[in-house]
Amino acid sequence: MSPLNQAEVERLFTASPFIQHLGLKLVSITPGECRTVLALEERHLQQEGYVHAGVQATVADHTAGAAGASLIEPGQFVLSAEFKINLLRAAKGTRLECVAKVLKAGASLSVVESEVYCGTGDDLRLVSKTTVTLAILRPR
């Protein structure tokens, strides 16, 4: 396993205007695994008061990208090439927590799985599961 690319992971959370606007926070990073949290606000909800599927997809995708980025070489970066999300139940609560783990780290593509949990206090339930394929690139 490659050493942890901490600088690139931190950059993913500080240099992305959309992620900062969303409010997604890095909780922890180890080689091949990332954990994030999102304190839910009204702006994250859809018309019935549940967490918007787009919010869940963004949290799962970005957390997966960070997990994948933890294993890349300096000078490389990751971009999502494809993802598939399964929304398992309606999400309602005060926060989302996401855990993403690299299933297969490759030289040009990596596959990562994210699980998103939602709830209040210690009562969190799995609300979605996402598989993300990441392209590993170098600036041109």
Image (spheres, helix red, strand yellow):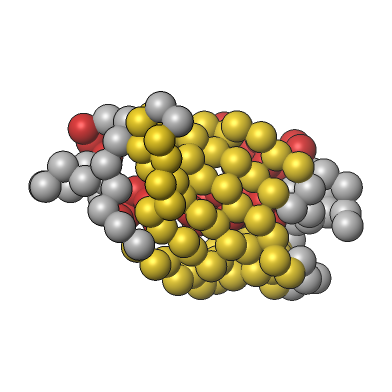
Residue 2: where, in percent of width, then height? 88, 54
**Residue drawn at (69%, 49%) of the image:** 33
| Res 60 seen here | yes
Residue 79: where, in percent of width, then height? 59, 61
**Which residue is outermost to the left?**
47
> Which is nearer the eye, 72 or 33?
33
**Residue drawn at (51%, 54%) of the image:** 115
Residue 76: where, in percent of width, then height? 75, 56
Q: Quadrant of the C terminus?
A: bottom right
Give left or right: position of 107 versus 78. right
Question: With respect to residue 74, does 106 lie above or below?
Answer: below
Number of residue marks: 0
**Residue drawn at (65%, 69%) of the image:** 111
Question: With respect to residue 33, does 1 lie above or below?
Answer: below
> Which is nearer the eye, 97 or 73?
97
Residue 45: where, in percent of width, then height? 22, 42
**Which residue is outermost to the front?**
123
Question: With respect to residue 64, does 22 lie above or below?
Answer: above
**Residue drawn at (38%, 54%) of the image:** 127
Question: With respect to residue 63, does 123 lie above or below?
Answer: above
> Which is nearer the eye, 78 or 67?
67
Give left or right: position of 45 versus 107. left
Give left or right: position of 6 versus 129. right
Q: Quadrant of the N terminus?
A: bottom right
Give left or right: position of 76 versus 117. right
